[in-house]
Amino acid sequence: MKISTLAQKISVILAGSLTCLGALTFSQCEVEAIVFTDRADWDAEFIGDDVFVEDFNSQPLGNFPVGTTDLGSIEVTIDGSNQFTRIANMGLIDDTNEFQGFIIQNSPTVGTLTSITFNFGIDVIGFGADFFSALTGDFLTVSTGANTYEFDNFLSFPGNGFLGVVEDTVFSAITFEVENLTNFGEWFTLDNLVFARRARPVSVPVPEPTSGLGMLAFGAASAIALLKRKGRSSQ
């Protein structure tokens, strides 16, 4: 289902405005976006375009180290460290490998992790993924830099399902955080990550031959009229 109600559009605009507090109006900082909760609708948006997939099936199981890890199609940057940021295979989404993250602050048992960033390495205008358990704690958010999307505006508890975005300007990374970072945290799983860039040629309308001749005639008449006016003013 494509999200298009007024309340959901407003929530995207307001979230986007938080990233540009110095702006005088929303129009100066918002990036127009469409949010999808149906993968088929997101896929239809990019028919004929360049779509890239990371399903994590070629990645080894285990925890991520602190810092940046190159997975081939994307780079993953972990700001912090805990035992639940890892590639796992628990069958939570489709019985294959999946990415698991646990964003939490000052936990005596699992540590601290404030954000997780996926860097695509190219400019894209859309991304999406299947999620599991994104709304059972501090509530997951994802940011493109221009807009921040709060999962509870689009998915119902416990935060299972597809979430995808298409924006009207390019971005090259997305960052996962939470709405209210506490020592309770938000543990989530995602799989079948997709990101896309436009590849379709943009058609430029060619004027009809008659309309082109008409424009030339109009331009010539205007030039003659201007010369006549200059001639009268110099007499």
Image (cartoon, rainbow, N blue to C red):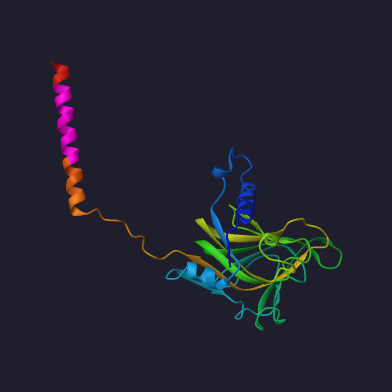
Please state the horizontal and vertical placement of residue 26, each as a whole percent of the image.
58, 43
Foreground pick, 150 / 95: 150
- Image quarter (top left, top right, bottom left or bottom right) of the N terminus: bottom right
Foreground pick, 129 / 174: 129
- The magenta stretch spans residue 229: yes
* Residue 172 visible, this orientation: yes
Question: What's the magenta region?
Answer: 218-231
Residue 69 drawn above or below residue 213: below
Foreground pick, 12 / 112: 12
User: In the image as oriented, which residue stretches furthest toward the top?
Assistant: 235
Please state the horizontal and vertical placement of residue 2, each as a whole percent of the image.
57, 65
Q: Residue at x 44, y 68 (%)?
A: 49
> In which quadrant of the rendered view does residue 112 lie?
bottom right
Tell me the chief SS of the magenta region.
Answer: helix
- Image quarter (top left, top right, bottom left or bottom right) of the C terminus: top left
Residue 225 drawn above or below residue 172: above
Q: Is residue 226 left or right of residue 167?
A: left
> In which quadrant of the rendered view does residue 153 lie?
bottom right
Q: Residue at x 66, y 62 (%)?
A: 154
Please state the horizontal and vertical placement of residue 234, each as a whole percent of the image.
15, 17
Please state the horizontal and vertical placement of residue 173, each as a whole percent of the image.
58, 60
